[in-house]
Image: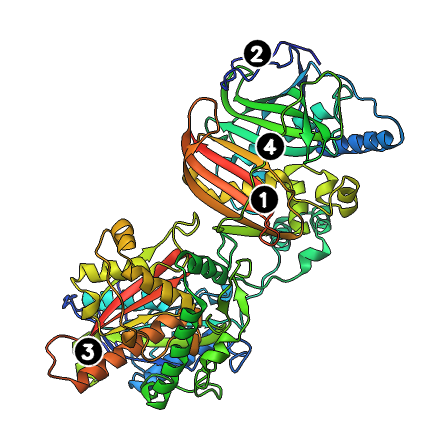
Amino acid sequence: MTSAPSYSPTASPTASSAGSARPTPNGTAVVVGGNRIPFAKAGGAYAGASNLDMLTSTIDGLAARFGLAGARLDEVRAGAVLAHSRDFNLAREAVLGSSLDATTPAVTLQRACATSIEAAWDVANKVTLGQIEVGVAAGVDSTSDAPIVVSERLRRVLLRLGRARSVPEKLKLLGQLRPADLAPVAPNVNEPRTHLSMGEHQALTNLQWQVTREAQDAVALASHHHLAQAWQDGLFDDLVTPYRGLTRDAALRPETTAEALAGLRTVFGNDQPNPTMTAGNSTPLSDGAAAVLIASPEWAAQRQLPALARIVDAEAAAVDFVRGEDGLLMGGAFAVPRLLARQGLGLDDIDLVEIHEAFAGVVVATTTAWADEAFAAERLGLPALGTLDPARLNVAGSSLAAGHPFAATGARIVATLATLLARRRAADPEREAPFRGVISVCAAGGQAVAMLLEA
Amino acid sequence: MSGETLDGGAFDGGSTAGAPTRVDHLAALPATGPLYAGALARAGRAMVATASVGEGLPDRALRVADVHLDRARLDAYCRLIGETAGEAAPPGFVHVTLFPLQLALMGRADFPLPMLGMVHVANRVEQLRAVRTDDALVATTWARDLVGRPVGSGDRLGTQVELVTEARVGRPDGELVWQGVSTYLAKGVQLPDLALLDRPERPAFSPPVPTGGWTTAKLTSREYATVSGDRNPIHTHALAARAFGFRGTIAHGMDTAARALAALGPLRGEAFTWTAEFAAPVPVPGRVALRLERAEDLDVTAGGVRPGWSMTAWDPRRGALHLRSALALA
């Protein structure tokens, strides 16, 4: 018995070409633009918002900015660091709640604080290979709406209770519980193998690299002043959509001074004789989300959208902080020199450098390592990058002033740097050499991701 | 119980030297609770009566055959200590599994030192290969080297003893896979006619830069007591700890040493010598700082240095040394 299937293909609106087209690697992925919500402080304006709420709004904002409502994109790739188990499919759920076409596929990923720069790297690679034409890389984190879990003992007893068959068996299991087992457990982001917080780790790195309080406070001061200037100049008109009454990053203190920063008490490394780390030179716990749109130049041109900057290359590094070989957040001291060496570039070829300010000490120690001949020779087997001109560093501020919702930071930086490079290109269209920018984002577990953009 | 001669053949340059000539076989590893209860009762009697300790070590080794590592307990131990729970047990888990043999020996009426109140001052493990959950072990424990030694910096004296535990696979003369030597000190106990050790050297300690650490907590100590069977009340009850001269509850020494080793992770390999010297007790609750450091010249065996790792733990607030440990690769 034969009966032909009776479905009739209906024309569905698709933003990209038919999925059956053969991949044609063209070697180019560009940043079309970005969108984020202003970053809030923990317990602040977004205290009632979940990761899914913030990510969905941010993707919606991106869709609104680039006319993508109802469009099917080839991929949305996003993640969160402090993830609820219910959000196992966070990126896909965000797509389904957004104005994008419901047939847009999505991937949820996590690489600690390098989550969304990793996502951008992945999307760019797929575009470069011609497998996809356009994708979104995004990240979100909430420290206000973080998961609270039950104690390990209670969890194990509950799991065994579910498997227990008889009432006496169940009673026996319940009898093992003590009052203390019932207390909820808040998340912490201490390193599981060293039991030290990131701040305590950075305090050790600061000792190793002799990072002074003054140097850290100078980084913090510059971050606030640069970010304030960038807001004033309207840089974020193209990059940020207000959310829940917040129109600007909540951690930003435009009026802060060196004296004010110098007056803060130290919060990390207080076991050391001369602690240097304060709430001023460490990032605040934050809530927020950021997304970046990456496509082939052809896709952008077809939709008359900009191609801000090309994603040229990226490199990851990881260090063995567990045995104290390198500081936890020093991956950028390896990733960036390796990336530039592969591309045959020196620090002088780079117009803008973005180092994620997890702590001001990360910026100081990383740039110190870049200039250290012995470190370069012994650890990298490469010539030292040399001394970085501070005028090229984090010119529109970074995480100390903006805040740092862990997984969102990479996408914030990729979109911001691409915009800055595009503006430099627009201001100097005749320059022969490309305007280049390099990003370094450190992450938990001793990792870091570096990325090279050019316009 | 039938006695038999302890067979030699230990690998550590004849570690059966001074070992007992007779072996008592136990049907199974004894439960630790009754052993502690008995010791508490004896300690109570000793407080009201003059201690009537014996002289010399019992001429007995205790042996138990067909010992299997307990899977569920190994999982719980690994989770607590920070090890990966696999088929191969961390060396500290073999120690806690076989620890009841030590207790049974120290709990015997003819053991010359009081079990409670003894301080674990050092531990040494020779592991020839990792002990696995499917190994059937024959474990033997005996005591050796009863000596007097100075205690603290004054002129107090105490008595020290080593408890040797070895684990062989399959048969009493099977493949030796693990050997532990635990050194205990009974402060204030003096026995006649003992050789006297020199005062141990105590090099000044200045805290290095840590690579990690952990916090101690009463709940964690109780969990370690449960999983290790080491229910010495100085680890779980402040009153008991004070009765034995401590300011409050203190962490299990082997808990501290095992956490330091766990931080090293898989770099320790399967075969090694693991040593631990316990200095100031670790207060509970409190914080512990740890430094792991690669070392090329670890002097853990007579005749020659070996590469490996040193592990140092201390109190980050007071700067007091808790643990000097080493892992020398085989």
Q: Nearer the viewer, residue A139 or A381?
A: A381
Query: Disc 2: which chain?
Result: B
Residue A280: x percent and y percent? 48, 74
Q: How is the image coloured?
A: rainbow
Label 2 vs 1, first from the N-terminus: 2
Label 2 vs 4, first from the N-terminus: 2
* Residue topped by disc 4: B122
Q: Secondary structure at mark 4?
A: strand
Residue B265: x percent and y percent? 45, 43
Marks 2/4: CA distance?
A: 26 Å
Q: Secondary structure at mark 3?
A: helix
Image depth: mark 2 or mark 4 in front: 4
Image depth: mark 2 or mark 1 in front: 1
Query: Disc 1: which chain?
Result: B
Mark identifier at residue B321:
1
Marks 3/2: CA distance?
A: 81 Å
Marks 1/4: CA distance?
A: 14 Å
The quadrant where residue B112 appears = top right
Q: Is residue A4 visible?
A: no
Q: Are marks 1 and 3 in contact (CB under 8 Å)?
A: no
Query: Disc 4: which chain?
Result: B
Marks 4/3: CA distance?
A: 70 Å
The amino acid type of the residue labelled 4 equals: Ala
Q: Is residue B48 above or below residue A213?
A: above
Mark identifier at residue B7:
2
